[in-house]
């Protein structure tokens, strides 16, 4: 039974997240129906990351098994026809060994969170950024972000709905940079807890507007208590950029 890997982009605004839902409104559901539409076979996709409702992807990876051999350009082109008019695109497809698993073979996941900090709201990018009305101190946030790097118990930054067996994760990268009038948080790790990136950005925002110091952020982390978390950043600023294998 051949196994195929796909690279996927989507604007998560209209979807309830990646994960399949009973009402069929997950990104996974739309892709599975698209594959069914041109192959006549029901398949089950497995994705590299379970993005939340409203979260976007430029580099989501998924795989599926099917009883027939398919041309990879057919998967891409026919799949995209059946995805219309939804904001999901199959960028590429390739046949991979049976040992490949989109989730468990991944060695690193890369996310970007975009903040748009000015008084006037954005227009064209309004569903792709977090609009913060006041300026933020990028240097303070970049310095404070260092306390989150490395291996920690990230319970404070973990959703109560998180299904991970352990709150301990190793954060490899958390850069805070200015980018064309925006502030970008560039985050990388092998894996993340549910809501971890958005929770960390929420804490750094409080550092950026002067309400917290780096010491306050560290105290929040060390508390290992969800009640010590700052307000969680909204989903629209977050994008899964790439998955490494």
Image: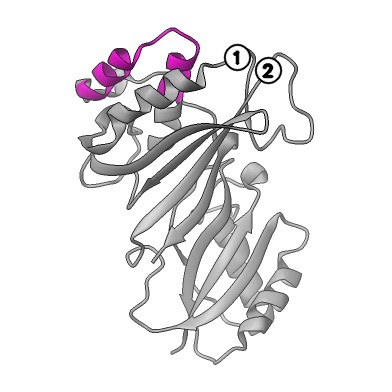
Question: What is the magenta segment's predominant secondary structure?
Answer: helix
**Mark 2 nearby-residue class (10 Å; few <14, some 14–19, many ≥20):** some
Please give left or right for residue 167 compared with residue 60 in the image: left
Residue 209 is inside the magenta segment:
yes
Q: Is residue 81 magenta?
A: no
Residue 108 image point, x, y percent: 37, 56
- The reply to whether discs 2 and 1 touch (Cβ–Cβ < 8 Å) is yes
Q: Which residue is mark 1?
A: 135
Let me know if residue 2 appears in the view. Answer: yes
User: Looking at the picture, does residue 87 appear above or below residue 123?
Assistant: below
Question: Where residue 179 appears, x then y in whole percent?
Answer: 61, 34
Q: Is residue 145 left or right of residue 219?
A: right
Q: Taking the image as drawn, is residue 193 in sight?
A: no
Q: Which residues are magenta?
A: 202-222
Q: How many marks?
A: 2
Q: Which residue is mark 2?
A: 118
Mark 2 or mark 1, earlier in chain: 2
């Amino acid at each position: 039974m051949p196994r195929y890997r796909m690279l996927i982009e989507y604007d998560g605004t209209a979807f309830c997240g990646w994960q399949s839902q009973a009402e069929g409104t997950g990104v996974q559901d739309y892709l599975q129906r698209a594959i069914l539409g041109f192959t006549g076979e029901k398949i089950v996709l497995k994705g590299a990351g379970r993005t939340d409702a409203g979260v976007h992807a430029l580099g989501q990876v998924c795989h599926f098994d099917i009883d027939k051999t398919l041309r990879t350009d057919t998967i891409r082109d026919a799949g995209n026809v059946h995805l219309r008019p939804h904001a999901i695109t199959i960028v590429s497809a390739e046949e991979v060994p049976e040992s490949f698993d989109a989730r468990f073979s991944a060695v690193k996941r890369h996310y970007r969170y975009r903040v748009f900090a000015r008084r006037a709201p954005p227009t064209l990018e309004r569903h792709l950024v977090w609009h913060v009305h006041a300026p933020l101190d990028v240097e303070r946030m970049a310095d404070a972000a260092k306390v989150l790097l490395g291996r920690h118990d990230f319970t404070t930054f973990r959703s109560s709905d998180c299904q991970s067996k352990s709150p301990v994760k190793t954060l490899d990268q958390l850069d805070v940079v200015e980018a064309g009038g925006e502030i970008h948080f560039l985050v990388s790790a092998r894996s993340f807890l549910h809501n971890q990136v958005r929770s960390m950005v929420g804490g750094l925002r409080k550092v950026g507007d002067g309400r917290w110091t780096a010491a306050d952020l560290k105290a929040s982390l060390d508390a290992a208590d969800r009640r010590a978390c700052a307000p969680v950043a909204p989903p629209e600023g977050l994008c899964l950029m790439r998955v490494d294998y």
